[in-house]
Amino acid sequence: MPEPTAHPGGAAPLLAIFTDFDGTLVEIAETPDAIEIPAELADQLDRTARDFDQAFAVITGREIADIDRFLSPLHLAVAGAHGAQRRRADGTLLELDEAVSTAADAIAKSIAPLVAEHPDLILEPKDGAVALHFRQAPDLEEECLLAMQEAIAEHPDFTLVPGKMVIEARPAGFDKGSALRAFMQEEPFAGRTPIFIGDDTTDEDAFRVAQEMGGIGIKLGAGETIARMRIADVASVHALLKGLADIAARPHASSGVAEEAPILADSTAH
């Protein structure tokens, strides 16, 4: 595993920290709005961002506005809708192509009759993407997939991505990996070693890009993954972020992530 880039003189490693949101920073809930936000989460993330010179970002399938609402008053660097939306660390919001928003609206309208027929389904329209949740109706997975396939048939610039009890339509060319790469080309992320923490199949693209750039992918929970490290649960993610912030705050910290974070395991070990 590549060693993280370190400050001269053996000080804290020059890391760029990226995380997913649902299932990683917060526990997954039955509905998107039912998640519980730990009281200390916003303060912890604010500290992590400050201790890493703002080189911290959330990369999520949710809209940026959702993350701001849940973490208020904190405003982090965020890639929303799998990168179709992005706010830089300096607060600059990158505008979404109007054609993408129009297509997402049309896809959502195509799915609406299915959701009206099955109230246990949840349609989540976003600015630039659409999610169809079937957590409360797992027997409808095939029907949901078919409906989403039909909905994007007239929108070849969109692609489907399966998640945990959800199917999402997003613009082709946007994924969590491309979002991470875009952040890494900008200050304050440029020149650092990326760490991405996530739990879902949609996070695999970010694991791949982080590791291609000499960094580390950290998979939360069980399941196949290309991430090189594994972590047990949401509480462990919070502990890891605190530990990394502690390392960064030390004037002469070790550059070894694994030795400072025993909650991590090699994902290839059996």
Image (spheres, rainbow, N blue to C red):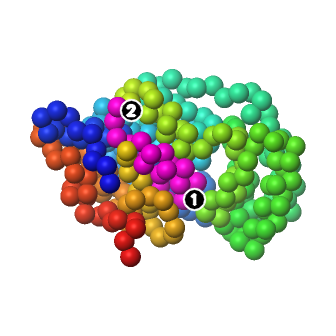
Q: Distance of mark 2 from mark 1, alpha carbons? A: 24 Å
Q: Position of residue 208 (x, y in %)?
A: 49, 50
Secondary structure under tag 2 reads loop
Q: What residue does disc 2 label?
A: 189
Q: Position of residue 131 (x, y in %)?
A: 70, 51
Judge from the rendering whether residue 257 lies leftward or rightward of residue 132; answer left or right.
left
Quadrant housing the N terminus: bottom left
Q: Which of marks 1 and 2 precedes in the sequence?
A: 2
Q: Position of residue 215 (x, y in %)?
A: 37, 46
The amino acid type, in three-letter code, at marker 1 is Thr
Is residue 71 something that shows in the picture? Answer: no
The amino acid type, in three-letter code, at marker 2 is Phe
Q: Nearer the viewer, residue 137 or 167?
A: 167
Instruction: Find residue 55 and report its image quarter.
Output: top left
Secondary structure under tag 1 reads helix
Q: Residues within 10 Å of mark 1 (few under 14, many from 20)?
A: some
What residue appears at the point 87 percent right and 43 percent down from the top-left corner? 154
Quadrant housing the C terminus: bottom left
- Magenta stretch in the rendered image: 191-213
Q: Nearer the viewer, residue 218 or 147?
A: 218
Looking at the rendered structure, which numbered label has been put on residue 201? 1
Instruction: Find residue 162 and report its image quarter.
Output: bottom right
